Image (cartoon, grey):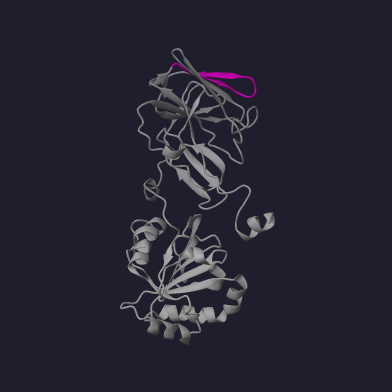
Amino acid sequence: MTRRLTAEEGLSWSGHERNHTFLGLGDGSFADATHVSGADIESDGRALAVLDWDGDGRLDLLLHSRGGPRLQLFHNRFPANTHWLSIELEGDGERVNRDAVGTRVELIAGKERWVSSVRAGEGFLAQSSRRIHFGLGEHEAVDSVVVHWPDGTRSVIEDVQGDRRYRIVYGEPRAQPVQPPKPSPGLQHLTARSPVRPEGKAPRIVLAEPLPLSSLELPSYDPGVRRLAAFAGTPVLLTIWSRTCPNCMKEFIARRRWKDRLDALDVRIIPLNIDRPVDPDASRRMLARYDQDASEAGPVDDAFSSLLVNVLFPNLLGHGAAREILTPTSLLIDRQGRLVALYLGSVPFERL
C-alpha cells in the first residue's frame, strides 16, 4: 500500500511543503511573516541565499526548490527609511585568503555595535553573498570599522558613511567606495511569467497543487445529472472539441493509434463538444467515424464554459489570458477526482 501511494499516486513522505518566513524583532524573538512575505509557496524549498541583488541596500532572497520553478528571486521592495552599510573584504592571497573567509568585522556608531563575519557556505547547500551587510537603523554614518583578519592582525577604518558599499583590502589603510552595478534594464522590472511555449508542442500546465473537482457536474447528452465523482478510481481525460476543428480530428486519429496504451493505463476519455447549436447525433457520428467512444460524450454547456474561462483559465494561465476556449483543450483528472494538468492543443501520448 505504501509503495502504491508514493509511486503510483504521486505522493511523498516529504513533499508539497510550503516555505515559512520569520521576521526578527530585534529582541531575540521572531514573528511569523510567512503569508505577507509572498514566499509561502508549495515548492519544497531546499537552499536559500541572501544577497543585495540590485545594490539598493535592501537584502533580497534567492530560493532554490526541489520542484518548479527551480530558482526564484524574491525582490525586497519594502520602503527604505533607515540606513545601511555594505562591506567587501579582500585578502592578499598570502597571509589572508583572497576571499577573506574567516574575517570578522565590527562596526561602532555611538553606543551601538554590530559584529559579522565572512563565511564560506551558509545554511543547507547554499552560499550567500560574501559582502557583509549591516543595517544601521537611524545612524547615517559609523565612527569606526574594525576588521579582525584571520592572521590575527587588525585594521581600523574611519570616515565611513552609511547607505554605501565599500571595499577593504588587507594591508590598505582606507576603505574604497564601490559603485554597485545596476541590473540590466530588461531585468529591473522582471516579474514571473509562465514558461514559453515549446515550439511545435501544446502548452501543458501541470498544477503544483492538484485541484479537487470530484463534485464537478459533467454535461451529458443523456438525461440526469452526472458528476466527476462517478469516475473515482479511474484517471479521466476531459477533451473539449469541435466538429469544425482539424486539429481535433488529428487528435482523434492519434488516439486511435495509442488506444492500447491508453487502455493499459485505464484512462477514461470523455469528449465534450463545444459546437452550437447542440447536436448530439452529429457529434456521436463524428466520434464514431474516428473510432472514439461516444458513450460518455456530452456538450460544453454554459456552466462548464464559465468554469473554464472565468475560474480555471485566469488562475492557471494568468488574468490576461484570452476569455475563449481553444480546441482541442484537455483536462487530466487523477484517480481522486483532482485536476492535475491542463493541455491547450493536441496532446502527444508521451506528454500525457
Image height of 347 relative to 322, above or below: below
Give x and y (percent) for residue 329.
43, 70
Give x and y (percent) for residue 185.
36, 48
Q: Give the range drawn in magenta.
A: 143-156
For the image, the number of numbered tags is 0
Give x and y (percent) for residue 198.
47, 66
Which quadrant of the structure image shows residue 285? bottom left
Give x and y (percent) for residue 12.
62, 51
Image height of 214 relative to 178, above or below: below
Please check the rendered image and state whether residue 150 is part of the magenta-colored stretch, yes or no.
yes
The residue nearer to you, when weighing 239 against 28, is: 239
The residue nearer to you, when weighing 204 against 292, is: 292
Please check the rendered image and state whether residue 256 is part of the magenta-colored stretch, yes or no.
no
Image height of 136 relative to 55, above or below: above
Which quadrant of the structure image shows residue 159? top left
Q: In this view, does 284 lie to the left or right of 352?
A: left
Q: Which residue is drawn at 69% across and 56% down?
A: 3
Residue extending farthest to the front is 224
Which quadrant of the structure image shows residue 153? top right
Image quadrant containing the C terminus: bottom right
Residue extending farthest to the top is 111
Q: Is residue 268 left or right of residue 37?
A: right
Residue extending farthest to the left is 277
Image quadrant containing the N terminus: bottom right
The residue nearer to you, when weighing 87 against 1, is: 1
